[in-house]
Image (cartoon, rainbow, N blue to C red):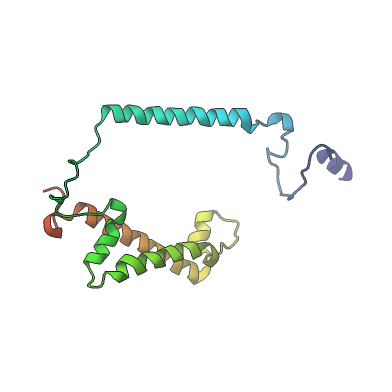
Amino acid sequence: MEETRERAFVKDPNKTYGLMEIVEGTSPLTAKAPEDTVDTFPHYILLMGICSLAVTLVLLLISLFFDAPLEDLANPLVTPNPGKAPWYFTGIQELIHYTNKPVVPAIIIPLLIAIWLLLIPYIDRKPKSRFGVLFNRFFIGGERRRILIGLFTCFVFAALVLTLIGSLFRGENWGFVLPWN
């Protein structure tokens, strides 16, 4: 045993690494030597540069062959009816529409959502299990995890519904219309 261990972990005075963990079973990564690895520069950087140029070329070609759906030039004397916020704010605009006091949906609710999103890493601790991540997230962790997942699902669903209503189903004078009419 001692002889095998000495052969597997040869100390090289030129390297500054150490054994971090011993795992059961075999792994193809343990047999890799420095000669079997690829350097980040130039191989990875060159690959990322080529991929970035390819994506830029595809976007350029799409923009050459398809027109952007732009409206007329801005005229301060003629405003659009209804005046809609961009799609990422239509959910908040819908919340304002359904209340008499616009301070609550316009300021307090987004502020609470932002604070909640900042606190999620500190509130939700992952339990350790030998099952997969999805199994851990949905079935292990007790009632608190189910409540957090339910709250987050309700939040995402409500945001999607309000955004779709504000983007597609609002017509003149902020009336409810069907988008296919």
The image shows residue 85 at horizontal and vertical percentages of: 25, 54
- Name the image quarter holding residue 58: top left
**Residue at left offset 56%, top offset 64%:** 125
The image shows residue 99 at horizontal and vertical percentages of: 23, 70
**Apparent side of residue 130 relative to residue 137 in the rendered image (left or right):** right
**Apparent side of residue 83 relative to residue 24 in the rendered image (left or right):** left
Total label count? 0
**Residue at left offset 71%, top offset 34%:** 32
Residue closer to the observer: 71 or 7: 71
Residue closer to the observer: 73 or 133: 73
**Residue at left offset 46%, top offset 31%:** 52
Residue closer to the observer: 178 or 61: 61
The image shows residue 74 at horizontal and vertical percentages of: 19, 45
- 15, above or below 175, in the image: above
- Name the image quarter holding residue 163: bottom left
* Quarter of the image where the N terminus is located: top right
Q: Is residue 175 visible?
A: no
**Residue at left offset 36%, top offset 63%:** 155
Q: Is residue 126 visible?
A: yes
